[in-house]
Image: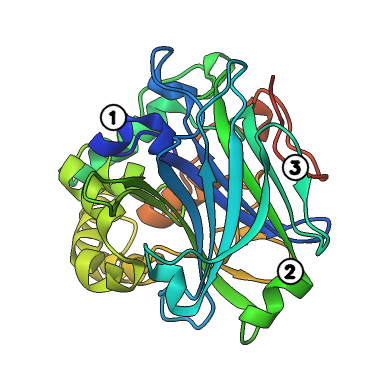
Amino acid sequence: MSHHLDSPAARADARLNISDTYVFRGERGTVFVMNVCSDAAGPDAPKGFHPEARYEFKIDTTGDAVEDLAYRFTFGPADTDGTQSLELRRLVGEDASDDHAQGVLLLTGTTGREIAADSGLRVWTGRASDPFWMNPGVVEAVGHAFQDGTDIDVPAQDPAQVSSLFAGQKIRSLVLEVPDAGLRPFTRDGRIGVWATTALATDAGGWHRVNRCGLPMVSPIFAQFDDELAEKLNQTQPADDPRTFEDVITDRVAAVVAARGTTADPRGYGRAVADRLLPDVLAYDVGTPAVFGFAKFNGRALTDNAGEVMFSLATDSALSIGLSHDAVDAPTTSTFPYVAAAA
């Protein structure tokens, strides 16, 4: 899993669970993708986009892990055929972190079709094949190791029999492409930090954050069997991540690499991993190819093997998941909406 059903709140309503966030170079500009509502929640779970929720791409343009720009999606109730109306708004400056700010209306339309503005900005939302793949035996073994402070005990597997944990499953995807002319004026040097959030309306008239996702695999590695930590990862603001999570990530990485014997300084390595992962924000240089690799994080493409990268980083070893992008049901594309739309 990446962040599929990563906490009790997310499991309560998969429509509010962000399984993955991607940022990469598209045909016209920067593409932001947020995937929610995984079929992993089961056939009886509610489907589509929650009509009382907000789905937001948060963007830091100054390097302080506080949003300076946000793109907010809201949806109407589903019609008989499952189609939903949608609105997209942009919020700038202090409004980007203000739950009561309205922002500027950019687009309206419906799910399942491309919507475009004269500026070149375009949107697609709807049901798609899950572009993420994961070996179930490996991710469970990693989760136990980081929970218990042990070496990773991957069960013996026949490579020919291993399939992705998400084979045959679909998600609901929000795809937003912002042309350079629409994004660069809000940045200082083209460097941005991105994370996605979902929030649900409360009876008191406010908004309750349910999910937050920046880097992939943070929750499955460190909180797969720790619901309290998983909820805290979702509720904390990115700017507060270092002081909130540095010690726990340092300690858990140090325990695992010590058990694996991969470094003479387990705690120093653990601190280096925590410093790299925190704040939990996906950094990207606007206009450049996305690269999510062991040596460098620069956005995240739909075909990046994020699981293997994060496992190898966290364990200080080459930890293979035994699968490649061929394990997905339908290939992503180089043309909008980039995800593999599903009926």
Please report the residue visible at 58 percent of the width from the left and 15 percent of the height from the top. Answer: 80
Q: How many marks?
A: 3
| Residue 251 position within the rendered picture, expressed as x and y whole percent measured from the top left | 19, 60
Q: Find the distance from the CA under tag 3 to the CA under tag 2.
A: 19 Å
Label number found at residue 20: none
Q: Secondary structure at mark 1?
A: helix
Asked whether, in this view, residue 241 is left or right of residue 81, the answer is: left
Label number found at residue 288: 2
Tell me which amino acid carries mark 2: Thr
Q: Could you say which is closer to the camera, residue 221 or residue 25?
A: 25
Tell me which amino acid carries mark 1: Ala
Q: Could you say which is closer to the camera, residue 201 or residue 253?
A: 201
Please report the residue visible at 19 percent of the width from the left and 40 percent of the height from the top. Answer: 227
Q: Could you say which is closer to the camera, residue 328 or residue 79?
A: 79
Q: Is residue 150 visible?
A: no
Asked whether, in this view, residue 247 is left or right of residue 53, the answer is: left
- Looking at the image, tell me whether mark 1 or mark 3 is earlier in sequence order: 1
Q: In front: mark 1 or mark 2?
A: 1
Residue at the outermost bottom position:
188
Tell me which amino acid carries mark 3: Pro
Q: Secondary structure at mark 2?
A: loop
Q: Find the distance from the CA under tag 1 to the CA under tag 2.
A: 38 Å
Vertical placement of residue 321 versus 95, above or below? above
Asked whether, in this view, residue 324 is left or right of residue 16, the answer is: right
Q: Which residue carries the number 1 mark?
A: 12
Q: In front: mark 3 or mark 2?
A: 3
Say few, some or many: other residues with alpha carbon within 10 Å of mark 2 (under 14 / 14 to 19 / 20 or more): some
| Residue 278 position within the rendered picture, expressed as x and y whole percent measured from the top left | 36, 68
Q: Which residue carries the number 3 mark?
A: 337
Q: Quadrant of the N terminus?
A: top left
Q: Is residue 117 visible?
A: yes
Please report the residue visible at 39 percent of the width from the left and 64 percent of the height from the top. Answer: 277
